[in-house]
Image: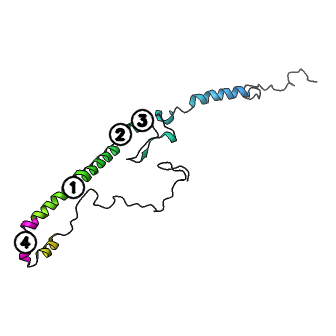
């Protein structure tokens, strides 16, 4: 029924590979190759070695848990850790050496004052030696490393809800 006349032929639509349903697979392959070229080049964990949750070590002095091995190695020289070590060393020195020496020196000063100065002061005040001792021997606020109140007052609620499973310092689930 089709006439072979030139004027009666319909225009031929050229089917290229993008419109053909048969070649859908080829299109997908071509798109994937473009996607592979553009994919993210990020290095996982910024190139650091990690410890998984159960294996993570912690610094009990600084209350830090480490995920990355490089951070754990660098922490020993960090300013935070060094300052806390110095503070612990200072407190140990005060407890073992400084405070006993300070108390001993203050007792010696009081004994010298009691022997040499207090009798004349009691005569000047016109009272007994015991009353003068009570007047002069009053409590002195000594500036020790712990004489001040806590440096940071807690602003959080006082009711602490413990984590369900006792993992330190905190559990991700409550």
Q: Is residue 135 left or right of residue 69?
A: left
- At label 3, counting other C-alpha atoms closer than 10 Å, the crowd grade (few under 14, some 14-19, many 20 or more) is few
Foreground disc of the pair 3, 1: 1
Res. 19 image quadrant: top right
Q: Is residue 10 left or right of residue 55?
A: right
The Cα atoms of the two marked residues, 3 and 1, are separated by 42 Å
Res. 38 image quadrant: top right
Q: Is residue 124 left or right of residue 79?
A: left
Residue depicted at 47% across the width and 35% down the height: 46
Location of residue 161 in the rendering, given as x and y in whole percent from the top left corner: 51, 58
Res. 68 image quadrant: top left
The magenta span reads 113-125
- SS at circle 1: helix
The Cα atoms of the two marked residues, 1 and 4, are separated by 28 Å
Q: Earlier in the sequence, mark 1 or mark 4?
A: 1
Location of residue 33 in the rendering, given as x and y in whole percent from the top left corner: 62, 26
Location of residue 8 in the rendering, given as x and y in whole percent from the top left corner: 87, 25
- Which mark, residue 119? 4
Q: Earlier in the sequence, mark 3 or mark 1?
A: 3
Q: Earlier in the sequence, mark 4 or mark 2?
A: 2
What residue sits right under mark 2 in the picture? 76
- SS at circle 3: helix
- SS at circle 4: helix
| Along the viewing direction, whichever of 74 and 3 lies nearer the viewer | 74
Residue depicted at 7% across the width and 68% down the height: 117
């Amino acid at each position: 029924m089709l006439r072979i006349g030139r004027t009666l032929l319909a225009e031929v639509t050229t089917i290229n590979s993008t419109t053909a349903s048969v070649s859908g697979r080829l299109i997908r392959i071509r798109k994937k190759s473009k996607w592979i070229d553009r994919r993210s080049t990020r290095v996982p964990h910024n190139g650091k070695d990690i410890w998984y949750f159960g294996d993570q070590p912690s610094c009990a002095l600084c209350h830090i848990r480490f995920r990355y091995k490089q951070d754990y190695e660098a922490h020993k020289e960090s300013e935070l850790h060094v300052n806390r070590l110095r503070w612990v060393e200072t407190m140990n020195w005060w407890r073992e050496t400084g405070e006993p020496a300070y108390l001993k020196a203050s007792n010696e000063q009081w004994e010298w004052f009691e022997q040499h100065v207090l009798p004349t002061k009691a005569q000047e005040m016109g009272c007994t030696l015991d009353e003068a001792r009570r007047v002069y021997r009053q409590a002195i606020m000594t500036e020790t490393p712990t004489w001040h109140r806590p440096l940071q007052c807690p602003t959080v609620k006082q009711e602490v809800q413990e984590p369900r499973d006792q993992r330190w310092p905190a559990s991700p689930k409550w």
